[in-house]
Image: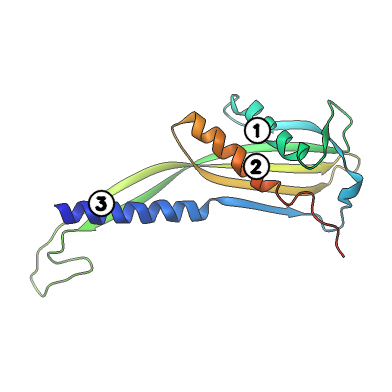
Amino acid sequence: MKLQRTIFACIASLLLCTTVLFAGVKTDYDRNANFSQYKTYSWENVKTRDQLLVPRIEEAVNAGLAAKGWTQVPAGGSVLINAIDINRNQQTLNTFYDGMGGGWRWRGVGGFGGSTTTVENYKIGTLVVDVFDANSKTLIWRGSASNTLSNNSEKNIKNLDKEVQKMFAHFPPSPKG
């Protein structure tokens, strides 16, 4: 029984690490856009099912853009910002064998053993931030961040701030040389 718990703990840790590997930040941008001409922005829209997230998302993005010297204006910014929050349920199946036949350690013909399968449910949250040229209405930059959501609101807010900070780490893109 102690061995099963140890194996369960190791596999659960491995699954958690795998989940963290899928989490991350991705960015892309229009290679022809001249980012040096943009210094102001206005919010166009934040879409989320949880209205408590709207000001949190705006604050995180505002901090990221302010750190780059951009200024928020109520209307008429050189770029428009849209953000969307998407949550999805994820499920992992974990099967554990007792070592008496079956599974990885088959012990000959007629070996009997048992296995236990557990289901782990968790939520993945993804934030997508789009930056549009206000005049042409073309997308010039997109950033996305995905992470496992917690039942702890404070932890989720800290993760949101951290992921958005990573998203804007190399923003605006350097001019092509």
Residue under label 3, please give it: 117
Q: Nearer the N terminus, badge 3 or badge 1? A: 1
Number of the front mark, 3 or 1:
1
Discs 3, 1 touching: Cβ within 8 Å: no
Question: Number of callouts in the render?
Answer: 3
The x and y percentages for residue 80 are 81, 37
The x and y percentages for residue 63 are 71, 35
Residue under label 2, please give it: 164
Amino acid at the residue labelled 3: Thr
Residue under label 1, please give it: 57
Q: Looking at the image, which residue is at 69% across and 31% down? A: 58
- Please, what secondary structure does the residue beneath circle 3 have? strand
Describe residue 1's horizontal placement relative to residue 172 as left or right.
left
**From what the image shows, is residue 137 above or below residue 114?**
above
- The residues tagged by marks 3 and 1 sit, at their Cα atoms, a distance apart of 38 Å
To which quarter of the image does residue 42 belong? Answer: top right
Amino acid at the residue labelled 2: Val
Discs 1, 2 touching: Cβ within 8 Å: yes
Amino acid at the residue labelled 1: Ile
Q: Looking at the image, which residue is at 65% across and 33% down? A: 57
Discs 3, 2 touching: Cβ within 8 Å: no
Q: Looking at the image, which residue is at 51% across and 54% down? A: 22
- Please, what secondary structure does the residue beneath circle 1 have? helix
Q: Can residue 115 be seen in this view?
A: no
